[in-house]
Image (cartoon, rainbow, N blue to C red):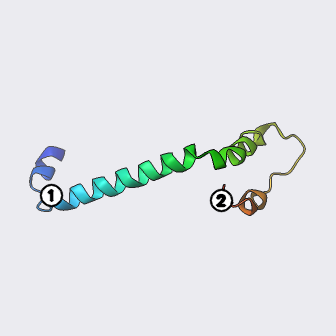
Amino acid sequence: MKSEVLSNFPWTDLTAVGFFIFMSLFAFYVYWAMKRSNKELFDDASRIPFQEGEKVNSNNIMKQGLGHE
């Protein structure tokens, strides 16, 4: 059924544009996650489950600027 619907889809250019938008965003998010400047943010976030007795405040993470300097 899926192949039948896709074979009759009139806008093949729209499919290609959607694919390139998806791949561009995916590549950007991979790049952002691998930037060295985000290491401290991710290290702090990885220690959150081990912080007993401390309240986790999402505002502190937001104040750090999500890795932006």
Q: Quadrant of residue 3?
A: top left
* Numbered label attached to residue 68: 2
For the image shown, how many numbered marks are present on the structure? 2
Mark positioned earlier in the residue sequence (2 or 1):
1
Residue sitting nearer the eye, 2 or 17: 17
Which residue lies at the image location 15% right of the left edge and 62% below the top edge? Answer: 11
Q: Looking at the image, can residue 1 be seen? A: no
Q: Residue furthest top?
A: 50
Using residue 57 as the reference point, say whether residue 29 is left or right of it.
Answer: left
- The percent position of residue 41, horizontal first and vertical second, equals 70, 48
- In space, the residues marked 2 and 1 are separated at their CA atoms by 38 Å
* Relative to 68, residue 49 above or below: above
Say left or right for 66 vs 9: right
**What amino acid does circle 2 point to?**
His
The location of residue 9, given as percent across then percent down, is 13, 57
Q: What element carries label 1?
A: helix
Quarter that holds the N terminus? top left
Q: Which amino acid does label 1 sit on?
A: Thr
Query: As drawn, is 1 to the left or to the right of 31?
Result: left
The residue to which callout 1 is attached is: 12
Residue depicted at x 90% and y 44%? 53
Residue 50: x %, y % from top left: 81, 36
Q: Nearer the viewer, mark 2 or mark 1?
A: 2
Front-most of 36 and 50? 36
Q: How crowded is mark 1: few (under 14 residues within 10 Å), some or many (20 or more)?
A: few
